Image (cartoon, rainbow, N blue to C red):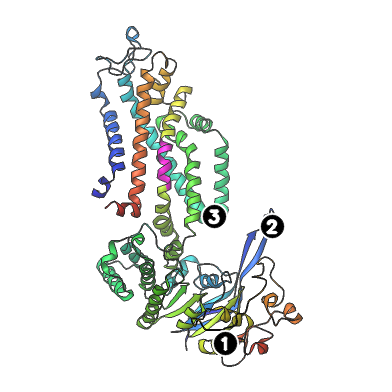
Amino acid sequence: METLIRAENLSKLYFINTGKTFRKTKFTAVNDVSFSIGKGEVFGLVGESGCGKSTLALLLLRLANASSGSIYYKDVDISELSYGAMRKYRKNLQVVFQDPYDSLDPRFSLEQIMEEPLKIHHYRDKGSRRDLIVKMFSSVGLGSELLKRYPHQLSGGQRQRLCIARSLILSPEFLVCDEAVAALDVSVQAQILNLLLDLKDEFNLTYLFISHNLSVVKFVSDRIGVMYFGNLVEMADTEELFRNVRHPYTAALLSASPDPDPESTKQREILGSGVPSIINPPSGCVFHPRCKYADEHCSREAPVLRDIGGDHLIACHKADMVKDGGARA
Amino acid sequence: MRELLRNKFIVIGGSIILIIVIIVVFAPMLTKYDYGAIDLPNKQQAPNAEHIMGTDAYGRDVWCRIVYGGRISLTVAICSTAIAMVFGTLLGTLSGYISGTLDFVLGRIVDVMMAFPMLLLSLIIGIALGSSTRNMFFSIGIPIIPMFYRLSRATTMSIKERSFVTAARSMGSSRWRLILRHIIPNVLPYILVIMSSAMGGAILAESSLGFLGYGIPLPTPSWGLIVNDGRSFMFTYPWTTAFSGAFIALTILGFNLLGDGLRDHMDPKIRTAAR
C-alpha cells in the first residue's frame, strides 16, 4: 500500500505557567510518535481524554507546530514549510472537528461557509462554485434549499454534515475526523459514521479517525493505534488488536467499553491512581503506576515500540503476560 | 437595505441622527441670528416667540448657538470616535491574534496611555499638535484608543481559539483573510456597543477642552461650551444648559440605538428570528 502520510518521531512540548515568575514548566503532549497511514486506509486513534490524540492530529495537519520530528505527505516533508508554503498542501489535508457548533462561523450563511474554501483556492466562477456546492450537499445528504440558512438554524447532525461537506469540497485525499461524532446523539452518530464510510468510497479518501469510543473506532477502522499519555503504546490491524490485546492499557480500555448484553458478567478492570501529573510524569514506562504487571524494570526504562509479529506493534516490557487480557472484550 | 429598515432600533436611532445632521447642515436657514452677536439688554430670556430657546447670559440666541455648535460637536464626536475605533480595533485585533512581542509592546504603550487621565492626555496631544479642528480629532480620539484596543484584543484572543478559525486555517486561508473575514466581523458587535459611549465621551471631552481654552477657538460655539456657559446660572436660569444638554443626550441616544440596531442586524441569530 502506498503511504499517504507518515509521522516520524513527532513530539510536541508545551510550556505552561506554574505561578512562579519567569519559571515555565514544559510538558509533553505528544512524545516521539511514529506511524504511517496508507492510501485508502482508515486509521483509528483511541485513548482517554487528554492523551494527545487531538494534538497529534493538529500536528499532522500543521495546525500546530511540532517541537521535533517530521511529517511526510507523499514523501514531501511538510513539517518545516512556512505558513504560506503550507497553504497549497492544505487542500489535500482536511479536518472535521468534534464540536459542530463551534466549527462554523455563526456570521456566515451555509452558502458562504461552503464558498469560503473555494474562494481561498481561487475557484473564480460563481456558477461553477454553486454547482460544486449543490453536488456536495447532495453527497452528504443536505438539501440545497438550506443554502440561505445560517448554522444556528440547523440541528447537530445537519451541522456535522455541513462540516463534512465543507472539508470535502476541495476534494482532499486525507481527512482527519477528530471525535467527529462524539457531540451527536447515538442515532445520529450511526448516520454520520455510515455517511463517512460511504464518502470514503465515493471520494477515495484516507481517514485518521480519532475517538475515545472503542466501538466507534472498531466499526470504522482498518488499523488502530492506542495512545496513552502522549505515547503510542499499541498499534495493530483492527481484528488483530481486538483478538490479541497485548498492552495492559489497551486491555483495560477494552474491558471498560460497555457491553450491550445485560446478562454479561464481564470483569471490569479498574485502573487505580488516575492519570499521572503532566508536569511530573512517571519515570520509565508512563503507564507503570497504573499497571498491574509493572515491576521495577518498568519504572526504570521506557519501553520502545516493537513489532511482535503480524504488524502488531507494542510498547511494553510485559507484553507476554497480557496474553489473555483482552480475550473477553 | 429593506432588512436594515425592519430593525426598529436602526430606524429610530437613524432618524434621530439624520434629523440632527439636517438641522446642523442647514443651520443658516434655521435662524436669523448671528451666534456671536451680543445683546445684553435681552440677556437670559426664557423661551419666547423671538428666541425659541431663550438667550444666554450675553443675550445670544441659544437655538442659534445650538444649531451652529452642533457642527463642531458632531464632527468632533464622529471623527475622533472613528479614529479611535479604526486604530484601536485594528491594533487590538492584531495584538490579540499575533500575540508575542507585538502584543507586549502595544500592551505597554496602552498601559502608559491609560495611566494618564484622559483629559490630561487630550491636552498634551492638543498642545503638541497645535490648535485646529483636525488636530482636535486626534487629541480627543487618541486617548479613547485604549478602550477599543483592550476590548478587541480580549475578544480576539477568545475567538481565535474557536474551531471555525482553526477550520479556516486548515482550508488554507491567509492570515489577513482570517483576521478580516472571520475575526473582525465577530469582534465588531462588541466594538459597536462601546462606540456609542465613546461618542458621548468625545462630545464631553471637546467641551472640557473648550472650557479650558484648548478647544475650538472662540467664538465658535460647541454644545459642550454652551452647557458650560449656562452652568453658572443653572439654578436661576436653567434654559441654556437644559436645551444644549438635551441635544447632547439626544445625539448620544441616537448613536446608541443605531449601534445596538447594527449589532443586532449583524447577528444572523437575531436577524433571522425577526423574520
Residue A328: give its label: 1
- Under circle 3, the secondary element is loop
Q: Position of residue B144 (x, y in %)?
A: 47, 38
- Under circle 2, the secondary element is loop
A182 or B244: which is nearer to us?
A182
Mark 1 is surrounded, within 10 Å at the Cα level, by few (under 14), some (14 to 19) or many (20 or more) other residues, namely few
Q: Which residue is mark 2?
A: A23
Tell me the chief SS of the magenta region.
helix
| Residue A101 is at least partly visible in this image | yes
Distance from Cα at disc 3 to Cα at disc 2 = 19 Å
Q: Residue at x 53, y 67 (%)?
A: A64
- Under circle 1, the secondary element is loop
Is residue B192 in the magenta section? Answer: yes
Residue A254: give its label: none
Q: Mark 1 or mark 2, which has the lower sequence index? A: 2
The subunit letter for the residue under badge 2 reads A
Which region shows up in magenta?
B190-199
The subunit letter for the residue under badge 3 reads B
Distance from Cα at disc 1 to Cα at disc 3 = 52 Å
Number of marks in the rendered image: 3
Q: Which residue is mark 3?
A: B99
Mark 3 is surrounded, within 10 Å at the Cα level, by few (under 14), some (14 to 19) or many (20 or more) other residues, namely some
Q: Quadrant of residue A250?
A: bottom right
Q: Are marks 3 and 2 in contact (CB under 8 Å)?
A: no
Query: Residue at the front extreme?
Result: A263
Query: Residue at the right extreme?
Result: A296
Query: Residue at the bottom extreme?
Result: A309
| Residue B80 is at least partly visible in this image | no
